[in-house]
Image: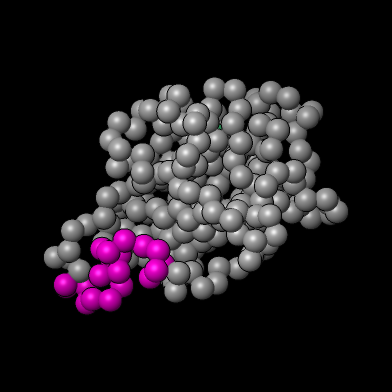
Amino acid sequence: MIRTTDVARRDLLGFGAATMLSTLLPSAWVSAAAPLRPTPAQTEGPFYPVVPPAEHDNDLVRVSGRAVEAVGTILHLEGRVVDRWGRPIPEALVEIWQCDAHGIYRHPRAPLQEMADPGFQGYGRTLVDRQGGYRFRTIRPVPYPGRTPHIHVAVLVPRRMRFVTQMYVAGEPLNERDFLYRALRDPADRAAVTVPLLPADAIEPGALRARFDLVLDL
Ligand SMILES: [Fe+2]
């Protein structure tokens, strides 16, 4: 398990102006600011786990009992779950799932299960902290036949509809040929789910980091 630390401080540096307003101003004033654009929903896809793996924490790279970590480039993924006024949604549960470094999902209907990386958890989930922050240690998503690299993300909020989307990698040439990415017609929607991967050697040598904030229209 890895912990969410310093998320609130980084949020103030890395989030939009409306979010900063919502953080700094009384709620009555915030309502006058332009609301944030909701993150677009995307299909769940066929490989959401039938049954969550026995280990389903927010470190997908390390599986208990295995000396060797997952194959692939480590990615430290973090973000916040907020409403359209930038307010944290403190009860949110964030799930991610993705294929391993060989392009294989951990799922009974996914092909090539016998070649799946046993060191990759494939799925993880975590509750957000009081600022709405979440974080995962996973691998950089890779392409598989028919799809550009992506990470599936779902958010569960008590008494609300489950929200599902996908995160894409900025600069990936396959994005423009991906049918689900292309289904996002509005450039602003594409921008909302496309994040840069940045070097994160200060966190872990050779690793990358990314920030994916989720704005829910509750
Ligand atoms: Fe997928």
Residue 207, position in %: x, y? 65, 55
Above or below, 139 relative to 147 = below
Q: At 30% from the left edge and 53% from the top edge, which residue is drawn? A: 218
- Res. 90 in view: no
- Res. 133 in view: yes
From the viewer's perspective, is 195 left or right of 112? left
Q: At 69% from the left edge and 38% from the top edge, which residue is drawn? A: 101
From the viewer's perspective, is 36 left or right of 92? left
From the viewer's perspective, is 101 left or right of 162? right
How many badges with numbers are in the image? Answer: 0
Q: Is residue 113 magenta?
A: no
Near-viewer residue (86 or 64): 86
Residue 124, position in %: x, y? 61, 50
From the viewer's perspective, is 117 left or right of 26? right
Q: At 61% from the left edge and 45% from the top edge, which residue is drawn? A: 140
Which image quadrant: the N terminus?
bottom right
Residue 6, position in %: x, y? 51, 73
Q: Is residue 12 magenta?
A: yes
Q: Which residues are magenta?
A: 11-29
**Helix, strand or loop: magenta stretch:** helix
Q: At 16% from the left edge and 72% from the top edge, which residue is drawn? A: 29
Q: Kindly give the residue lying farthest to the left in the view shown.
A: 32
Color encoding of the figure: one colour
Near-viewer residue (204 or 118): 204
Above or below, 66 relative to 131 = above
Q: Picture quarter containing residue 34?
A: bottom left
Near-viewer residue (214 or 13): 13
